[in-house]
Amino acid sequence: MSEAVAKRMRLSEREIDDIRVAALLMDMENLEITARVIKKAVGELEDYDNAPHTFHGTELVESLGSVLTGAFPLLLTQTDEPARLQGDKVPFGARIIRTVRAYDHLTQNVYGSSVPSAKDVLEEMESDHDADYHPAVLHALEEVIQANGSKLQKSQDASTEEPELVGA
């Protein structure tokens, strides 16, 4: 969703990629990749064409370095402290991720309670002056939600339509 908001805001491809990677890394905060998983994956690759596929750790770090260079500053500024208190230190991509994550959190069904509508959540976020969500990000988020809602509605309408009968 952060990536869609960044695209809606017409950010550069590099900024969009950084936001996508940072958002994915945040979502993986509780994921642990063990040596056993890596060994199994490499073993399956070796079985694929009977040729060993090895790489050095430095090669992995170098290949990821350029990808993570733009994403890490976005991750480092993801705190509960409002953006206005952090000043100019907050990259715009971090504001996008923070806003989308807050929206996602507010729309979760917690302990069986009813899920608020997207409109209600966005209105609550707009009125939360302490959180300091950027108005342009909220507007882009609203457009993304509306676009996704209309796509969802179209697919639901298509699945509930009566099939057209052809022939006798």
Image (cartoon, rainbow, N blue to C red):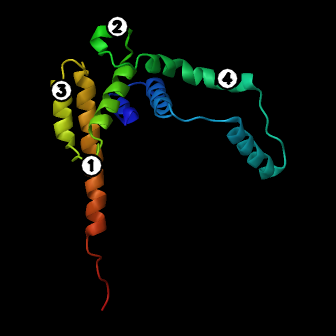
122 relative position to 44: left or right: left
Say which of 69 and 105 sits in front. 105
Task: Give the residue displayed 23% in from the left and 46% down from the top.
Answer: 113
Using the numbered discs, state the Cα–Cα distance from disc 3 to disc 2 in whole angstroms: 21 Å
Using the numbered discs, state the Cα–Cα distance from disc 2 to disc 1 in whole angstroms: 39 Å
Cβ–Cβ below 8 Å for labels 1 and 3?
no
Cβ–Cβ below 8 Å for labels 1 and 4?
no
Name the residue beneath numbered marker 1. 112
Name the residue beneath numbered marker 4. 61
Q: Earlier in the sequence, mark 1 or mark 3?
A: 1
Question: For the residue marked with disc 2, what is the amino acid?
Answer: Asp
Q: Earlier in the sequence, mark 1 or mark 4?
A: 4
Cβ–Cβ below 8 Å for labels 2 and 1?
no
Name the residue beneath numbered marker 2. 88
Using the numbered discs, state the Cα–Cα distance from disc 4 to disc 3 in whole angstroms: 40 Å
Of discs 2 and 1, which sits in the foreground?
1
Using the numbered discs, state the Cα–Cα distance from disc 1 to disc 4 in whole angstroms: 43 Å
108 relative position to 54: left or right: left
Question: For the residue marked with disc 3, what is the amino acid?
Answer: Glu
**What crowding class fits label 4: few (fewer than 14 Cα within 10 Å), some (14-19), or many (20 or more)?**
few
Where's residue 70, x and y in %? 50, 19
Q: Earlier in the sequence, mark 4 or mark 3?
A: 4
Cβ–Cβ below 8 Å for labels 2 and 4?
no
In this rendering, the answer to whether 106 lies above or below 149 is above
Task: Give the residue displayed 68% in from the left and 21% down from the top.
Answer: 62
Q: Earlier in the sequence, mark 3 or mark 2?
A: 2
